[in-house]
Amino acid sequence: MIIGSHTHFGKDQILGSVKEAISYGANALMIYTGAPQNTFRSNIILEYLEDAKKLMKENDIKMENVICHAPYIINLANKERIEAWNFSISFLKSEINRCEMLGIKYIVLHPGSAVKHTKEEGINNIIEALNCLDLDDHKCMILLETMAGKGSECGASIEEIKTILDGVNNQNMGVCLDTCHLNDAGYDMNKFDEFLDMFDKIIGLNRVKCLHINDSKNSLFSHKDRHANIGYGTIGFEAILKVVNCDRLKEVPKILETPYISKEDNEKEQLYPPYKFEIEMLKKGQFNPHLIEDIREFYK
């Protein structure tokens, strides 16, 4: 099983990310190259990169299983303020350049929200923006993430994802499937094989390069996008277990983005990462009904 989680890109950059992934028992990981909510970026330190590569080799972590996520502040769908739209394009390009400095092959991108545009206009804006990137010059592949359809989000249906992919001149693009987003958009993860059949017919399974593995706090078709810990949401452990063990996506890295666990039930501040325990649970194939308590006890 190729599985990991979101990791922090801190003062020792990707080296720290790899160390964190190893502590979770992971053989895959996802990073942001800086805070996802702002534009501040520190220079890539090549010494940390070389040490990270050595550590990855020692722990059987392949570079193709290291995923980058583009910052949330990028919105290619909204062209209401042309300067903001142009900035999103240039900032995404700089993130792709940083990925290529790190040797990362895939960057996950939220397609964007149309805001005051129609959905069709928003999708056309995304296509235009991606065509401005000159993707032929880049080795790092953009993966469009399937969205929940919250507000004016684009990419909440497979058909919308296909429209974007078809409109981009460079066809070296892929897709990241998010189980929570798919559920909230109306795709039943208890019928994952049927979903894959449909996806293969419309887009092609060869385009799927990453899976985000999350349970959902919401019902099917809710369009809300609220992640839950594995087995503690409406999708359920058994359905998610089938997803991560799906032979058709065996070589695709699975990345957990589940919520941190608070110190006590009534505390809002999220303190403890659940990934070590959720990865272990999925590898064993057995739900742990004491997951929350075990995490709190471990981090005491």
Image: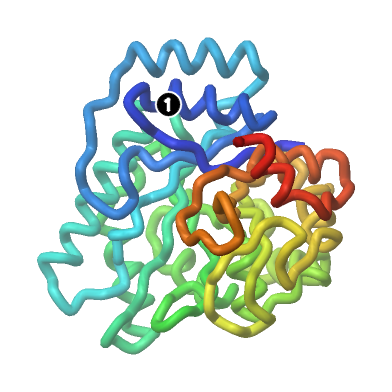
Task: Give the percent coordinates (x, y) of residue 202.
Answer: 65, 71
| Residue under the point 63% across and 11% down | 58
| Residue under the point 52% across and 10% down | 54
In the image, taking residue 95 as reference, residue 64 lies left or right, namely right
Task: Give the percent coordinates (x, y) of residue 173.
Answer: 48, 52
Q: Nearer the viewer, residue 115 or 97?
A: 115
Task: Give the percent coordinates (x, y) of residue 20.
Answer: 54, 28
Whether residue 98 is situated above or below residue 292 in the rendered picture: above
What is the total number of numbered labels drawn onto the structure image?
A: 1
Residue 267 seen from this side: yes
Helix, strand or loop under label 1? helix
Q: Quadrant of residue 216?
A: bottom right
Q: Amino acid at mark 1?
A: Ile
In the image, taking residue 77 as reference, residue 232 lies left or right, namely right
Residue 162 seen from this side: no
Q: Quadrant of residue 277?
A: top right
| Residue under the point 37% across and 69% down | 112
Q: Quadrant of the N terminus?
A: top right
Whether residue 150 is situated above or below residue 262 in the rendered picture: below
The residue to which callout 1 is attached is: 14
Task: Give the percent coordinates (x, y) of residue 249.
Answer: 74, 49
In the image, taking residue 86 as reference, residue 68 lies left or right, namely right
| Residue under the point 45% across and 33% down | 104
Colouring scheme applied when the structure was drawn? rainbow
> Residue reaching furthest left?
83
Q: Nearer the viewer, residue 12 or 190?
A: 12
Q: Quadrant of the C terminus?
A: top right
For label 1, count other residues whose C-alpha is less than 10 Å away and answer few (under 14), some (14-19) or many (20+): many
